[in-house]
Image (cartoon, coloured by chain):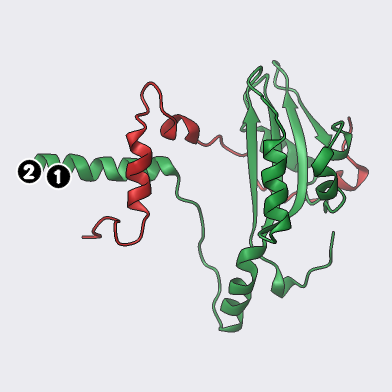
Chain colours: A red, B green
Amino acid sequence: MPLRPARVGRVGVIRAPVAKTAVVAAAVTPGRGAPVAKTAVVAAAVTPRVGRRRI
Amino acid sequence: MTEVSLDELGPVDYVVVEFPAGASNFTGEMAAELLALVDSGTIRVIDALILTKDADGNVEATELSDAGELGELKAIEAGLGELLAGDDVEHLAAAMEPGSTAGVLIWENLWAAPFASAARRAGGQLIANGRIPIQAIIASIEADEATATAGG
């Protein structure tokens, strides 16, 4: 299906080709090479007062 | 698109969600969650497109309205602003694997708009923003753990 005419010939808002980000699911989903424990560790790191020391 | 004063506009973000060939499992859950964010006033969807990239790398873009039965997404489609231009399609599709389909979503973070306006009125100006990948958090924690282990 073609794009709507209003989209054609306009200056875009995404200035450059987008690079693929690392697939987050692989890092936080239980399975080979991605221990489920990591999810809990990350959650702890971003929880108030439980987080890590800065120095 | 609803007219919004520039001063009241919240930050605008985008995602490209790729579905590798044969891996999609649409149950309506995504649409329901998106609608919940819209209904709660958390976000306003500005644009949406569906991209497909064939095995040879050719990209085709489909308007949401041309994507078949929209169901709950019909309400969202009616308010789209068509922000993306033809050039944007190529730029966004650069991240896609051949043979995949992807949904592109552009939205305004309505939840952040009042704070952003207040910051501007206070004389502040945005000089940096971004997202911290979960991988970076994991890497940082693992580095800490390694240091603690080596030190202990």
Which chain hosts label 2?
Answer: B
* SS class, disc 1: helix
Q: Residue at x 71, y 43 (%)?
A: B32
Q: Is residue B112 above or below residue B105?
A: below
- Residue B122: which quarter of the image? bottom right
Q: Which mark is residue A43?
A: none
Marks 1 and 2 close (CB-CB < 8 Å): yes
CA gap between label 1 and label 2 equals: 6 Å
Q: Is residue A15 visible?
A: yes
> Which quadrant of the figure contains the N terminus of chain B?
bottom right
- Residue at mark 1 shares a chain with residue at mark 2: yes
Q: Residue at x 74, y 52 (%)?
A: B45
Whole-percent x, y for residue A43 in the image: 38, 48
Amino acid type, mark 2: Gly
Q: Which mark is residue B148?
A: 1
| In the image: residue B124, left or right of residue B109 | left
Residue found at the far right of this picture? A5
Residue underneath mark 2: B152
Which chain hosts label 1?
Answer: B
Amino acid type, mark 1: Ala
Whole-percent x, y for residue B133 in the image: 45, 45
Q: Is residue B79 above or below residue B94?
A: below
- Residue B104: which quarter of the image? top right
Q: Is residue B91 visible?
A: no
Q: Residue at x 36, y 24 (%)?
A: A33
Whole-percent x, y for residue B109 in the image: 65, 60
Q: Residue at x 80, y 46 (%)?
A: B85
Q: Nearer the viewer, residue A26 or A18?
A: A26
Whole-percent x, y for residue B119 in the image: 56, 77
